Image (spheres, coloured by chain):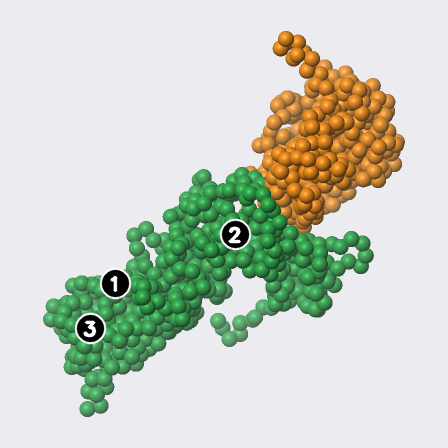
């Protein structure tokens, strides 16, 4: 995937330099204020000051739930005699989301700086990076960054001579979606099966190795050096009052210019889709959009009219910004098949621990498979609704609930397509995507 | 314990809460399911167990917490701490729906083959189906298939299709037995319980507890598999004689009303299985596999016929002969069993205490490869009542000849584990034993006696805890109860002393 050099208006914190073969290195990062925030934090600020600054900046978590990062850090009691851990959640597995990959490939040192500052704020001696196993370049760049940081005295014993010490462990996941869920991630880090666990206790009370642990998304942590460098007041001037800062958006699907974009919160959604991303491929109309990874509820073209890209507006529109993994769906797409593909993913990735998701995801996929194969029954729609509702709030982790939302939100919007498929045994769109394949003509040429 | 021992009472903070409108109290820190149980309310559960960690994966214990306003709040009772003033609702329409949904999920890929399932009749899934679901499956799609008859060990078969992934067995091996021999592989509805790669479930001497723990018919005892339906069986409270721990057990055997006349009558007096009986003072909730195998111990070939010098004799005649031998003896010695009940030991002491010096032997020694002692239950002495016997008689010395002087004239051997060759050749031998043995015929008088499952009594374990066992089967008329026999055997002593 090409990294799109965006011409988007608005402030950029991360995509504000030309990406080259060496732009990710420590030397070049230093030319972009690199590690100045860390110096400031270690030399001029107490750990509590750092947390206060992050809280004052109103930084929201970028993993999907948009939980205020400062509040999460504030729960951990300093000086309670327990080791504290900060874990960077780089297990970016939500379908359609690849913004953390860009961050780790292009600004690995910024992520590392955020992690070191976060660990300092929580007085951790060890920090962990749980990186998605499929990531190759991102993994190598993070590993290089860690090595460079150790060599430059930015990690290890007595960082920058300030007396603060931190070691970072880079851990590769083995390809499980659910390990992106914080408690499952910690179980996996501990060497156990990646199964989420029940709260209470919260991870900030008993997390990794039963010690207070803060798990932050990569994008959350890259914001930390920015906040410390600019100060909370300046940071809050970017974005909207309720969603300060910027959001990395990875857009894919039937979009003309797919890629990773950095948008200021409050950016007009339609402007982003139709102008910055060039609209839908081959001039088709937008049918609907998956706003932030397939776990967020789908919105159709009219529902994003006038909506701005920030958490409150997205919630008001009936969905969430989630992880910023946007998928555009063009007109003529069969939504039954889209639901089937999404459900196949959830069935494959359900961890198998708690009953509703373990059994429900397979059940939903089997129903959708049957509908797509032409064997749909009239009661199937109600059954799909009922299964997704039985998953809502009844599972250990929130992936169970959201797995149900995906399908029910598609049915909410496109029930008639499901009814048509069940009645006629075929898709309203003949089961074909009507978006023209850009390579189709080339293939025709080869054949002739 | 000294008389001035201070009883320390930890005063736990009590919280007031309510379940379905009934006011109750809970200890601070208790979860809703624990507090409910302490107050006699049973909240349905599959994966929760009082002595294991809380995974909260079955989701059947869902309860609602009454809210002053806003959306209803529901969560699993097994992981929810009781808070003061909390009002737990277990029977609202929403909870009923959630439980029914959960039961539908659990039975979705369960084969529901109760007709051929060994757990049928004592299966939690069956009970909860009738209690909480009661409807046919909503699914019209084929069930997923998984392994049938997967051998987890030589003793335990796993039917993965019946498994509901409660992980009780995995947690038992991790948290109680310590073998860490089980785990889960794969994800979603293809997840399977499997033995760990670096452990051997055969080496877990507590492995059979997972069969009891399994709430469904997934874990099956190869001994009981296709062997008996549980509704034909009843249990009798007993004590495992396998070691000095004396674990409380339930011995399962055929119900009286289901006794068989036409088939093999031995099936009527057979131990079909052994399960632990909860006893916090002794064994908690568990027993080791030795207790499970008591059938092999008690169903060895029995001695059923009294003999005099190898010639079959009537029980009464043999008893009289033995009584006369003891009555006439000048220097008798008794070898006392460490498998006799407290009642038998006191009867023995009452009968012979004054005249016959006795020595306690170990009827059973550890078998080759048997675990001598471990972290959980197994104790080194493999006899159930040596402590009570030693309170009355000294132990048999290591050099047996020290206990058996050359001029002794009568030796009474009670129980197994004593080599007749050690007895000086001139002495008369009276032998009381339950099992067939080559030495039986060599004795001057041999009297068969009942085994533990044919009589009632008590054992005193290593820590001094006295536990009762009850008779499961009737005893044959040709076999004597040792307790009654001792009085008869001492008749001549009593007569002699009064004469």
Residue A309 position by quadrant: top right
Question: Is residue B214 visible in the rendered structure shown here?
Answer: no
Residue A325 position by quadrant: top right
Q: In the rendered structure, find residue B306 and report the number of the disc placed on it.
A: 3
Q: Residue at x 63, y 40 (%)?
A: A367
Pointer 1 with pointer 2, Cβ within 8 A: no
**Looking at the image, which is closer to me, B316 or B227?**
B227
What color was chain B assigned in the picture?
A: green
Residue B95 spot, x, y in % from top left: 68, 57
Q: In the rendered structure, find residue B301 and report the number of the disc placed on it.
A: 1
Do the residues at pointers 3 and 1 share their chain? yes
Of badges 1 and 2, the one in the foreground is: 2
Pointer 3 with pointer 2, Cβ within 8 A: no
The residue carrying mark 2 is B112
In the depicted structure, whether residue B231 falls above or below residue A279: below
**Chain letter for the orange part:** A
**Looking at the image, which is closer to me, A2 or B332?**
A2
Q: Residue at x 49, y 61 (%)?
A: B121
- Secondary structure, mark 2, is loop
Do the residues at pointers 1 and 2 share their chain? yes
Lateral position of residue B332 relative to residue B100, left or right: left
């Amino acid at each position: 995937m090409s990294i799109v050099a965006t011409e988007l208006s608005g402030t950029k914190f991360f995509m504000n330099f030309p990406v080259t073969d060496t732009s990710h290195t420590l030397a070049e990062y230093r030319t972009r204020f690199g590690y100045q925030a860390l110096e400031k934090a270690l030399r001029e600020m107490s750990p509590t000051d750092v947390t206060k600054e992050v809280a004052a900046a109103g930084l929201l978590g970028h993993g999907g739930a948009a939980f205020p990062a400062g509040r999460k850090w504030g729960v951990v009691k300093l000086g309670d005699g327990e080791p504290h851990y900060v874990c960077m959640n780089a297990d970016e597995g939500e379908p359609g989301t690849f913004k953390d990959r860009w961050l780790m490939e292009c600004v690995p040192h910024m992520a590392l700086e955020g992690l070191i500052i976060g660990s300092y704020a929580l007085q951790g001696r060890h920090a962990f990076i749980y990186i998605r196993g499929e990531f190759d370049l991102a993994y190598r760049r993070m590993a290089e960054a860690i090595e460079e940081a150790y060599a430059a005295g930015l990690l290890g014993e007595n960082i920058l001579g300030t007396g603060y010490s931190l070691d970072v462990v880079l851990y590769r996941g083995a390809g499980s979606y659910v390990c992106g869920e914080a408690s499952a991630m910690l179980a996996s880090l501990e060497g156990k099966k990646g199964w989420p666990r029940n709260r209470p206790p919260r991870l900030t009370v008993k997390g990794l190795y039963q010690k207070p642990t803060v798990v932050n998304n990569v994008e959350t942590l890259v914001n930390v050096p920015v906040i410390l460098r600019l100060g909370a007041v300046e940071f809050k001037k970017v974005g909207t009052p309720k969603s300060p800062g910027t959001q990395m958006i990875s857009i894919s699907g039937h979009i003309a210019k797919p890629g990773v974009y950095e948008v200021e919160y409050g950016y007009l959604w339609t402007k982003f889709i139709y102008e910055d991303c060039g609209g839908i491929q081959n001039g088709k109309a937008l049918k609907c959009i998956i706003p932030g990874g397939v776990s967020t509820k789908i919105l159709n073209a009219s529902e994003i009219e006038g909506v701005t890209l920030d958490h409150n507006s997205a919630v008001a529109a009936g969905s969430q910004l989630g992880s910023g993994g946007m998928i555009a769906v063009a007109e003529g797409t069969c939504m039954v098949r889209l639901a089937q593909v999404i459900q196949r993913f959830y069935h494959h990735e359900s961890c198998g621990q708690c009953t509703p998701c373990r059994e429900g995801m397979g059940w939903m996929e089997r129903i959708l498979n049957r509908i797509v194969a032409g064997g749909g029954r009239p009661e199937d729609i109600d059954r799909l609704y009922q299964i997704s509702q039985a998953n809502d709030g009844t599972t250990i982790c929130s992936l169970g609930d959201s797995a149900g939302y995906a399908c029910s939100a598609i049915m909410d919007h496109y029930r008639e397509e499901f009814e048509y498929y069940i009645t006629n045994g075929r898709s309203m769109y003949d089961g074909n995507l009507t978006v023209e394949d850009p390579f189709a003509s080339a293939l025709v040429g080869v054949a002739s | 314990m000294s008389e001035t021992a201070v009883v320390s009472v930890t005063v736990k903070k009590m919280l007031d809460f309510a379940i379905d409108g009934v006011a109750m109290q809970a200890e601070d820190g208790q979860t809703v399911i624990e507090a409910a149980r302490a107050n006699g309310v049973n909240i349905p559960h599959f994966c929760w167990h009082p002595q294991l960690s809380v995974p909260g994966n079955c989701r059947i214990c869902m309860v609602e917490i009454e809210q002053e306003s806003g959306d209803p709040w529901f969560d699993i009772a097994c992981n929810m701490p009781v808070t003061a003033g909390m009002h737990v609702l277990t029977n609202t329409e929403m909870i009923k729906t959630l439980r029914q949904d959960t039961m539908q999920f659990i039975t979705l890929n369960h084969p529901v083959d109760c007709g051929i399932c060994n757990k049928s009749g004592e299966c939690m899934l069956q009970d909860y189906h009738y209690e909480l679901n009661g409807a046919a499956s909503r699914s019209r799609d084929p069930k997923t298939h998984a392994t049938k008859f997967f051998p987890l060990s030589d003793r335990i078969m796993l039917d993965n299709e019946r498994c509901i992934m409660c992980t009780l067995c995995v947690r038992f091996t991790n948290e109680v037995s310590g073998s860490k021999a089980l785990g889960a592989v794969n994800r979603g509805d293809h997840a399977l319980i499997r033995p760990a790669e670096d452990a051997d479930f055969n080496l877990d001497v507590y492995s059979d507890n997972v069969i009891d723990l399994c709430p469904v018919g997934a874990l099956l005892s190869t001994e009981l598999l296709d062997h008996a339906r549980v509704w034909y069986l009843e249990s009798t409270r007993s004590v495992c004689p396998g070691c000095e721990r004396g674990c409380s057990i339930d011995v399962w055997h055929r119900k009286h009303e289901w006794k068989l006349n036409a088939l093999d009558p031995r099936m009527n007096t057979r131990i079909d299985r052994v399960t632990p009986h909860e006893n916090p003072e002794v064994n908690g909730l568990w027993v080791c596999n030795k207790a499970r195998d008591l059938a092999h111990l008690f169903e060895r070939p029995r001695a059923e016929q009294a003999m005099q010098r190898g010639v079959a004799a009537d029980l009464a005649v043999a008893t009289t002969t033995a009584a006369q031998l003891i009555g006439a003896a000048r220097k008798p010695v008794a070898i006392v069993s460490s498998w006799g009940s407290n009642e038998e030991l006191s009867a023995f002491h009452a009968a012979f205490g004054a005249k016959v010096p006795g020595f306690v032997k170990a009827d059973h020694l550890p078998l080759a490869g048997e675990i001598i002692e471990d972290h959980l239950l197994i104790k080194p002495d493999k006899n159930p009542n040596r402590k009570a016997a030693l309170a009355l008689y000294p132990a048999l010395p290591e050099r047996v000849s020290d206990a058996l002087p050359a001029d002794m004239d009568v030796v009474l051997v009670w129980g197994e584990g004593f080599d007749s060759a050690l007895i000086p050749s001139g002495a008369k031998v009276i032998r009381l034993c339950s099992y067939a043995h080559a030495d039986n015929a060599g004795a001057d008088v041999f009297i068969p006696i009942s085994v533990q499952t044919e009589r009632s009594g008590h054992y005193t374990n290593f820590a001094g805890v006295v536990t009762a066992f009850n008779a499961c089967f009737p005893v044959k008329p040709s076999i004597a109860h040792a307790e009654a026999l001792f009085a008869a055997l001492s008749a001549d002593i009593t007569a002699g002393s009064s004469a």
